[in-house]
Image (cartoon, grey):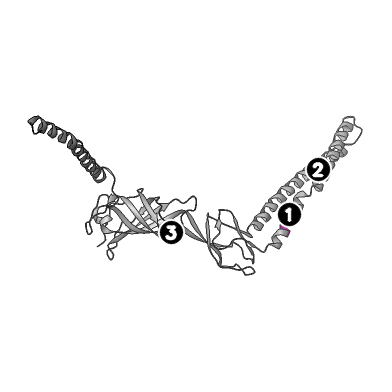
């Protein structure tokens, strides 16, 4: 029972039981090392990316007023409404302009004078041809033939005059329609109604009626420290993380980078445009702008694209 062969067999069995466990531990250690290496070296890290506080703002504000002096008759929108370019916003009192359009339309539709001139021209033409024939036979004196010829020419001129009057009537109609159109205030932009300054029945002389904000695209502004000077360039794409809607990222494009640094604050202004075709974003919210480069060390001034001469002392 205690023979050397038995000890050898027991040792071999013991070895055969421990080998698989040792091999598994080695594989797990190797995989852990590979995962750590991948996360540390291969995957992009946003922890060290440059981030700055920013503000999302409407691209512009427009205060809509009336081009003519009148009284406000109706407001067609309310504060907060989304409006499109050319959409009616308000109507002014326009009873006189409507009457003028109606009168101008009647003048255009009045064609009896032209028809009368056509009939007269046809008669004068026949009379002229008859006189010419009789004159060839010496049946009428010369002055009768000349008279018929003159009356025919005058009839042609009268018809042409009537047609010119109708053309002027059409032009007058278009002018009156334009005057009437000025009594409807339309939106000059796509945006939202921010505020209203006038009420129905009030005069709109020398005052604004509504205030609009253009929200597509939006404008993003931020104040960058001096160490960012030269790192941010026009045309650069930046990730924007707004407060609302939360947990979403949007792409903005740098449009303006101040060429001068404010010596009092040690900073400069950056402006970006942010597309908002579906009106998902809203203006007036805080945001975070994340750039595709690492945050520079505080106090370290880098001038990669703008010379140091641009700094104001």
Name the secondary structure under disc 3.
Answer: strand
Name the secondary structure under disc 1.
Answer: helix
Q: How many marks?
A: 3
Q: As drawn, is 268 to the left or to the right of 191?
A: left
In the image as oriented, which residue stretches furthest toward the bottom?
202
Instruction: Give the position of the N terminus as an image quadrant.
Output: top left
Viewer-side residue, 228 vs 3: 3
Q: Position of residue 285 (x, y in %)?
A: 42, 60
Quarter of the image for residue 219 reads bottom left
Task: Report crowding for label 1: few under 14, some 14 to 19, many 20 or more residues within 10 A (C-alpha).
Answer: many
User: For the residues carrying marks 1 and 2, which lies nearer the camera in this image?
Assistant: 1
Residues rendered magenta in the picture: 99-103
Give the CA separation, mark 1 to mark 2: 26 Å
Q: Residue at x 48, y 60 (%)?
A: 61
Viewer-side residue, 277 vs 261: 277
Q: Which mark is residue 57?
A: 3
What residue is pinned by disc 2?
155
Q: Residue at x 80, y 43 (%)?
A: 154
Q: Position of residue 241 (x, y in %)?
A: 38, 54
- First reached walking from the N terminus: tag 1 or tag 3: 3
Q: Residue at x 71, y 49 (%)?
A: 170
Give the CA separation, mark 1 to mark 3: 48 Å
In the image as oriented, which residue stretches furthest toward the right?
139
User: For the residues carrying marks 1 and 3, which lies nearer the camera in this image?
Assistant: 3
Q: As drawn, is 261 to the left or to the right of 281?
A: left
What residue is pinned by disc 1?
104
Magenta span main SS: helix
């Amino acid at each position: 029972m205690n023979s050397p062969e038995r000890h050898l067999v027991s040792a071999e069995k013991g070895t055969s039981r421990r080998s698989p466990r040792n091999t598994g531990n080695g594989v797990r250690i190797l995989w852990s090392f590979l995962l750590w290496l991948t996360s540390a070296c291969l995957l992009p890290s946003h922890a060290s990316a440059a981030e700055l506080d920013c503000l999302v703002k409407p691209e512009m504000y427009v205060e809509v007023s009336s081009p003519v002096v009148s009284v406000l008759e109706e407001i067609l929108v309310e504060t907060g409404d989304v409006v499109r370019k050319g959409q009616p916003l308000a109507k002014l009192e326009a009873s006189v302009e409507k009457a003028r359009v109606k009168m101008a339309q009647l003048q255009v539709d009045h064609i009896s004078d032209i028809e009368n001139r056509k009939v007269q021209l046809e008669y004068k033409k026949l009379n002229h041809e008859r006189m010419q024939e009789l004159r060839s036979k010496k049946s009428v004196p010369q002055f009768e033939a000349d008279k018929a010829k003159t009356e025919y020419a005058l009839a042609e001129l009268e018809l042409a005059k009537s047609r010119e009057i109708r053309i002027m009537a059409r032009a007058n109609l278009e002018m009156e329609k334009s005057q009437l159109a000025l009594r409807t205030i339309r939106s000059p932009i796509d945006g939202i109604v921010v505020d209203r300054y006038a009420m129905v029945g009030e005069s709109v002389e020398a005052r604004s009626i509504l205030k609009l904000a253009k929200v597509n695209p939006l404008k993003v502004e931020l104040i960058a420290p001096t160490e960012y000077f030269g790192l941010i360039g026009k045309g650069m794409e930046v990730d924007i993380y707004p407060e609302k809607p939360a947990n979403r990222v949007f792409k903005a494009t740098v449009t303006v980078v101040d060429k001068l640094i404010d010596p009092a604050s040690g900073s400069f202004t950056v402006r970006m445009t942010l597309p908002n075709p579906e009106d998902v974003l809203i203006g007036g919210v805080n945001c975070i702008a994340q750039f595709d480069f690492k945050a520079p060390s505080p106090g370290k001034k880098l001038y990669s694209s703008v010379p140091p001469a641009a700094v104001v002392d």
